[in-house]
Image (cartoon, grey):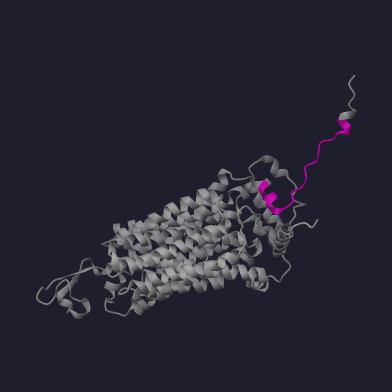
Amino acid sequence: MADSTPFLSEPAEPKLPPRSLDETIERCIGGFGWFQIFQATLVSFAWVFDAQQTFISVFTDAEPSWHCTDDSVCNSFSKICQLPKSSWSWDWPAHTSIISEWSHQCSTSFITGLPASSFFTGCLVGGLVLATLADSTLGRKNMLLLSCLMMSISSIFTVFSPNIWIYSALRFITGFGRATVGTCALVLSTELVGKRWRDQVGVIGFFCFTLGFLSLPAMAYVNRGSSWRTLYLCISVPTVLYCILVHFLVPESPRWLFVKGRKEEAVTTLKSMAQTASVLTMSFSNVPVEQETWDDNIYSSIKVLLNKKWAAHRLAAIMLTCFGVGMVYYGMPLALGNLPVNLYLGVALNALFELPTSLITFFLIGKINRKDSLLGFTILSGVCSVLCAVMGRVRPSLQIAMELISFFNACGAFNMSLIYALELFPTCVRNSAISMARQALVLGGVFSPLLVAAGRKNNLISFGVFGMVIGVCGLPLIGLPETRGGTICDTMDEEERKQCQKAAAAIPTLA
């Protein structure tokens, strides 16, 4: 009879508990299931409405074309402000643009550019006020819903604006709400999936932003004879319906719930996302979660970021880079009216050039260094932007080509800057850090309309400044660490220990 002792003396090796929260979530929800694909895509779809609200002023605030009705006092070389109103007429009905409806064709550049600047200023203020709520009290999902609802409802009220002043005030409120939409969507979507697919999921939002940008010229062209108010309704009402879907179909980030000490909710969320039945009976009592010990209020995360020298250095460098990127990214489409190209065609080409940028980012994100690629994008965008201004005096036909190449690289820098910021900071302050980086992007956008208005007579003031700013602002990246393939930490202490380990490993062992 065979001896069974060997079977008793060699027990099966026990399954070790996960060594980190990352591994715990990986074991629970797996790498990337169909349910996660649906949730990540749904969350990322918020970028569609974000893009539409960002660039809608290109069409609603544009100065329409006009024609002479009295050839005795009017010709193609006449200036509209020097002609009697009876001698000319708009090519389209006056209600197609706020400029023609409220007769601001002769107003100063400050007034005509006020709505766009108000929107970006609202984004800036909203980012400063709302940035920390997703990390401190509301969480990623609730902050996303609040931002989308504020953005859509204020946009609906914009339809009833009686003058440019009320219109600008409502655009400020829309920008205030919109400030954290993309940030919350990016963070929540990447925290709902495993480590392997985190990079690719982050790029889904960029695809959605491109889709929203690309849909605008199509919607504007279809409604080119209709009121500008119709265009606002077309992008605002679907946003409200989107919020209802997110409320019922998307869970809160389990990673954020763990870090905030809401372990029972986190466990319930993980089990609802589990891909295998065995996970449903898995014990979560020994999940290694490290909570932050600093005072928890709405601005505590910003305070911690500034108090930690390494975090403040990273934040300052990435924000300076984002400022330059934002100036070019938001300024290029607004400046298309200064180039010899059809506005609808120019915006469509810019939107189309965002698509290959998103594709390149999606397929190469796991293989390219964040810092080097971001630095390369900023330098190339700056060079081409300056060339765009120079070509206007030498070969105007090449201006649009330089503009498209510059915008292409600015799109790549935009995408990479957010992914890089996502990996530079731990979970407890990640949303706040990315929000600050995004506000730097928006701050660049605040100055863009002013430069565009000033550059109508001299492209060096717009495209030339764009190029110099983005080129110089990319230089602080040289002092930042590379994050490709690294582990994403959850607390500040964990991030500091990781940096100490890297520094120790870099020191050669003495013989």
Q: If the image is split into quadrants, where does the C terminus sit?
A: bottom right
Give the percent coordinates (x, y) of residue 238: 43, 57
Is residue 311 left or right of 352 when viewed as pictured?
right
Vertical order, 456 against 499 (above or below): below
Of residues 506 and 253, the one nearer the viewer is: 506
Q: Residue furthest top?
A: 1
Highlighted magenta segment, given as a residue range = 7-26
Residue 16 in sight from this viewpoint: yes
Give the percent coordinates (x, y) of residue 203: 51, 53
Q: Residue furthest left?
A: 72
Vertical order, 433 against 28 (above or below): below
Figure label count: 0
Residue at the spot 58% in from the left edge and 57% down from the top edge: 188
Of residues 459 and 167, the one nearer the viewer is: 459
Of residues 273 and 18, the one nearer the viewer is: 18
Residue at the spot 51% in from the left edge and 74% down from the top edge: 125
Find residue 304 and report its image quarter.
bottom right
Residue at the spot 40% in from the left edge and 63% down from the top edge: 384
Q: Is residue 284 magenta?
A: no
Residue at the spot 51% in from the left edge and 48% down from the top edge: 363
Give the percent coordinates (x, y) of residue 69: 13, 71
Is residue 448 left or right of 264 when viewed as pictured?
left
Q: Residue furthest front?
A: 511
Is residue 376 left or right of 337 when viewed as pictured?
right
Of residues 136 and 332, the one nearer the viewer is: 332
Q: If the image is split into quadrants, where does the N terminus sit?
A: top right
Give the percent coordinates (x, y) of residue 306: 64, 73
Residue 194 in sight from this viewpoint: no
